[in-house]
Structures are given as structure tokens and as C-alpha cells.
Image: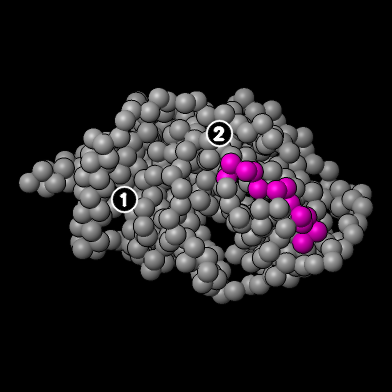
Amino acid sequence: MKSTKIVIALLLFASAVTANAASLLNGLALEQQFNKDRYFVAVYSDQLADNTSALLDNNVSRSLQIRVIEDRLSARRLRNQWMESIAINNPSDTLTGQANNMVTFANLFKGRLMSGDHLSIDYAPDTGTTSVSLNDIMLGMIEDRDFFNTLLRAWIGPVPPSTEFRDSLISSGDVDSGLLATYESLQPGAARVAQVAAMLDEQEAAKETSSAAAAPVPAVKPKLAANIPPPTLAAISTAAVQKPTVEAAQPAAEEPEPARTEPAATAVAATPPSQPKPLKPTTTRPATPPVEEEELEEEEEAPLTADMILARQIYHSMLLRHTFKHIRYPKRAQDRGQEGSVRLNVTIDNRGNVTSVTTVQESRYSSLNREALEAVERAGPYPATPVQLKMEEYRFSVPITFRLPD
């Protein structure tokens, strides 16, 4: 009886939150990996916006909606990709201040998401609360006025999954009708809703049991590792091939505006050629994720802590800065006015040696796709894995945008 009451209460609360959520669809973007549709990301707002600063207004109700297309989607994979993007699109003081909230948020993601699932993140400006629900069932709440923007910058910040992805979310309601029809057709079945409710009930029961047995632990303010420098947005966004607009390059008011880059051709020409590496990583363009990646995602991982999340986020930012130093805009592509975005998954060992590279998303131009792979090869070896992560190998994604000066 108790579990039934909990589920009913959660359903009623979720319905109230949904009713008060932002109602205008500002933009819709499709996430594709390995040439396969994975999920939609939609941004709703009470006020339509065509720029990032307006969409980051904390005085406006907003909502992030993820609707799953794939039959099965690892919640851990989605969470980790999101945290990577958060790391490279937020200033270091924001990452430090939100570390404990990120632990709470990350621990809401369990198991696998299914086709039709609705993951909703709703922001209420009157209370500054961010609510997270799955299929209209409340998973948790984070009471911090700045947390929602920390999540949102991952998609619309200076280094989004791709410029096309970001532009689709800040389209001020101009959404492709075909994509919208597919997005709206994705709905969870009654059996799936019941399954999520049962899973939540089990988790609540497990929490009650563990809370009764565990001794109270004093809160500890997270600290940055001494050997890892904090990420700087300017260092990331001013790479030779990255030329975001001024608005997108300055997501936080306290963050200094990065200098505008010189034309890519000039910057590339001034870069001395790197010496070829004797060993090259395995580079592939699989149509589906490698089987070992899917298997590894289901392995148990150490409990997340604020220190661990900070270490991962800062290390990821360091790896991207290191990669961007080795990117050269192909001259032939410049001459032909070719632009595009490429995303890679890179695996390194704990010493920083590249062991594999896979192309998650390609541009339309082979020269840009090839240069992205070769840039990772030139970048090796990478900085060694921080000892506090205790990982024999580290996987990270690299979004690369080749963009010519306006």
C-alpha cells in the first residue's frame, strides 16, 4: 500500500510540474551517432529566442526534453556525454560550484532508456528549482537557480555537439515539420510507465534501507586536484578551427569574452608541421558502436563523488585543448569554402597513449573527416590520466567544427 501511495503522489506532483512547464517549442535537434538516430533534444521556453543569451535568462520558465528514438539507450552513456559537454561549455568556477548538484543529477540516471521515453528537465523561475522526470514520473529536484543553465550550456554553448545542433535549438520556434512529427510520435507505452514507477519504488526502498544502516557523513567541499589546471573557455573556443559567434562564446557573465580568431587559413599556415608518429591508433568508422563499448557501459562503476566529477570534467577539458592545438584546416577545403562538424570517440590508456579512435559523426567532406582523425593521431600521447580517477583507460568524445571566417 505504501509503494502505491508513493507512486500516486509522484504522478500527481509530476503532472503539476508538467502543467507549469514552459510551453513554447524554441528548437528541436536530432542526435545521431554512428549514422544512427539516437534521440531528440528539444528546448521549450515561455519566450522564443534566437540567441543563447536570451535562452539562458533565469527569469523565464524553460524546459529541456529528451525523447529516445533508439530501441535501447544506455543512461550512463547519455549522462557521461552530457557531463563532458557541461565541462567544456561552463567556466571553472561554475563546475566547482555545481559539483555536488552534478552528483545528485548523475545518480538519477539508471539502467537503460527505451524508445519513446521522455526525459524532462524543467526550470521554475519563481523557486529556482530544476525538476527531473522520466515519462512524467518525478526522479528528483535540484534547488539551485544556476543549475539549469549549467545543463543547457552543454547543448548551446561555444562547443556544442555540432554547430547545426546548437542552431536547431536556438531557432526561435522555426522547427522542421518532418522532425517535429517524428518527435511528437515518440510516446512511452503504459507498460513502460509502470516499469519506471516500479523501478523508482525499488530505488526508494533501497535508499530507506541504506539510510537506516549508514552513519552520517559530514559534507566536504570539493577541491580541484593540484596537478590539473582549471579549464578556461577562451582556451577552448579560440582553437584555429573553432570560430563561434561572440554570443555563443560567452555563456557566463563573469567569463571574459574570448578574443576573435584570425582567419583559419592564416592560423593554419603559421602552424609548424608536426613530426609523424611511429605508431597510429586504430581508426574506424563503424555503423554501430563497438560491442565492447556496449558491454563496458553495463559494468559497475565506483560511486560518483564531487571530487571525481570535477576531476573528470577538468581532465576532459584538458584533453580537448590538447587536441585543438593539433588541428589544421585543410587548405583545399578552405579554398572550396567547405565547413562542417566531426565528432570522434577516443580511447587512451592511463599514460595518455591513443589506443583507438572511432568516428561518431562525420561531415559531408572527406578531407575534414580525415583531418579530424589525423589531428588525434598527431596529438598523442595525451596528458596521463589523473591518479584520482583510478582508470586503466579513459574514453572521451571530441567535437570538432571546421568553420571559415565570416
Secondary element type, mark 2: helix
- Closer-to-camera residue (269/10): 10
Secondary element type, mark 1: strand
Q: Which residue shows up at 35% across the image and 42% down it?
A: 132
Q: Mark 2 is on which residue type?
A: Leu
Horizontally, is 162 left or right of 260 in the view?
Answer: left
Q: Which residue shows up at 35% across the image and 25% down it?
A: 126
Q: Which residue is label 1 attached to?
A: 134
Horizontally, is 39 left or right of 120 in the view?
Answer: right
Residue 321 location, x and y as percent? 72, 45
Quick one: label 1, few (<14), some, or many (20+) residues within 10 Å? many
Q: Is residue 236 visible?
A: yes
State the count of labels: 2
Q: Which residue shows up at 61% across the image and 55% down it?
A: 392
Q: Is residue 194 above or below residue 251?
A: below
* Region rendered in magenta: 377-389
Could you tell me how far apart the alpha carbons at marks 1 and 2 are, in whole angstroms? 25 Å
Question: What label sits on residue 95 in the rendered view?
Answer: 2
